[in-house]
Image (spheres, grey):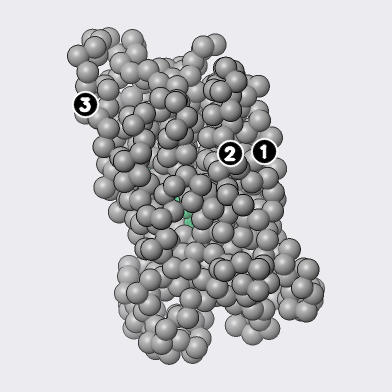
Amino acid sequence: MPQPSLSSPAVPSTPSEPTATCDVAIVGAGVTGMTIACALKDSGLRVISIDAAEREAAAARTQVYALTLLTGQIFDGIGVWERILPKICTFKQIHLSDRGRLGVQFQTGDLGTEQLGYVAEHSVLLSALHEFADDRCSQLTWICPAQVQGVEYDSEGVNLHVEADGRSRTIRARVLLAADGKHSRIRGLAGIGTRGWKYWQSCITTKVRPQKGHGNIAYERFWPSGPFAILPLPGNRCNVVWTAPHAEAKALAALDDEQFLVELKKRYGEAMGEIEPIGERFVFPVQLMQSDRYVLPRLALVGDAAHCCHPVGGQGLNLGIRDAAAIAQILQEAHKNGEDLGSLKVLKRYERWRKGENLTILGFTDFLDRLFSNRWLPSVMLRQVGLWGLRHVSPLRRLALRLMTGQLGRHPQLVRR
Ligand SMILES: Cc1cc2nc3c(=O)[nH]c(=O)nc-3n(C[C@H](O)[C@H](O)[C@H](O)COP(=O)(O)OP(=O)(O)OC[C@H]3O[C@@H](n4cnc5c(N)ncnc54)[C@H](O)[C@@H]3O)c2cc1C
């Protein structure tokens, strides 16, 4: 791991003088922030990455993500995919259904690809990005655990006041990227507002082991209370993402194992035989959020700091990885052309690229959740027509798959077609 240059003898005694300077400061070294850092590996830009958590603690999260084909292509373009792919699950079929009936089966033949997506554990992704950064990102300096105390912007750059190892330090950067998640402190300090809403649902996630093989199939079953997804993991494990109204989700999470299993089996179905719970249960509130703006002079918001969406369809992190590839490309191009990296002119290119595309997916996931999470007759009829269309009209099926696998929209140059 490259050591922070902060420990150099040149550290001044007053915290307001920069103790380190860089071109790009990234606050938040989650998957989104680390993807930017790794994508900038050959850019010639000096990068400082700051996170509130210790590296090991950040990687220890038990979350699981469905990853799109585009995300795999972006990681491949960076060069980190070969460290990830052997440790994750590839799925070749998606079964989508209304209350476990009236299903549509998406196959690889619908897209002409070898797979339809992947399922990865957070620890696998972040550890691979950490190792890649250690091996390949010599221009990256890492500061964690560290708390950002304040940010000052001026016409030439930005000063970040950071508390790390019990010391106050000032980091000077030409541009600041906020990848610090949905409660982004950097977004708040910059006074950027957000729009959106909290859903009436929460999401329970847990891992199970089915008696029979999961067959590398991803299931999305819509129930009136909310979507229920089963995602295949290596070692014949599955990750369950179960959305239900808040009170119901809370009550389900509080059940003892035996009762929880009874409820789980009602949604899970019989296809994989008996199921054995093998993990803790976590409950997440669900919200849709879009920041009013993604950029200001010297600042860009990336990933959940800029937007977040309902987990149906597993899109949130995938959008963040697209943002990461886009901002990395724009900064590299600006650097090559001798432009000012933090100027609004440069950063607006990122906002124009990503804000509309993200909004499309936010809107689509919201539409899916609202359409299926009720028993209202017109909705029931509309979704039956929609599922019929997906089953029988190939171009419609292909379009839906292209949208959800990240094939629509502008692709970053990192993607090798
Ligand atoms: C139940 C559920 C299921 C989901 N399933 C999927 C899925 O299948 N596929 C998918 O693509 N997405 C999914 N998502 C969405 C996904 O979890 C998020 O989009 C993703 O975690 C966002 O990543 P990020 O790196 O932008 O932010 P985060 O993961 O929130 O990372 C932020 C980082 O910033 C650091 N940080 C925070 N504050 C500070 C600070 N003040 N100073 C310094 N560092 C700070 C944190 O320590 C952390 O490392 C799901 C979400 C939920 C709730």
Give the mark nearer the N terminus: 2 vs 3.
3
Q: Which mark is residue 244?
A: none
Give the CA separation, mark 1 to mark 2: 8 Å
| Figure check: 322 above or below 298 | below
Image-based side of 63 in relation to 357, left or right: left
* Local secondary structure at mark 2: helix
Q: Position of residue 1 (x, y in %)?
A: 26, 37
Type of amino acid under label 1 = Trp
Give the mark, 1 or 3, whose residue is nearer the N terminus: 3
Q: Which residue is mark 3?
A: 166
State the image quarter where residue 227 is shown: bottom right
Q: What residue would you read off at disc 2? A: 326
Q: Which residue is mark 1?
A: 353
* Residue at 42% across, 84% down: 213
Q: Nearer the viewer, mark 1 or mark 3?
A: 1
Quarter holding residue 124: bottom left
Dots 1, 3 in contact, CB < 8 A = no
Question: x and y percent of residue 27 in the render?
Answer: 42, 33
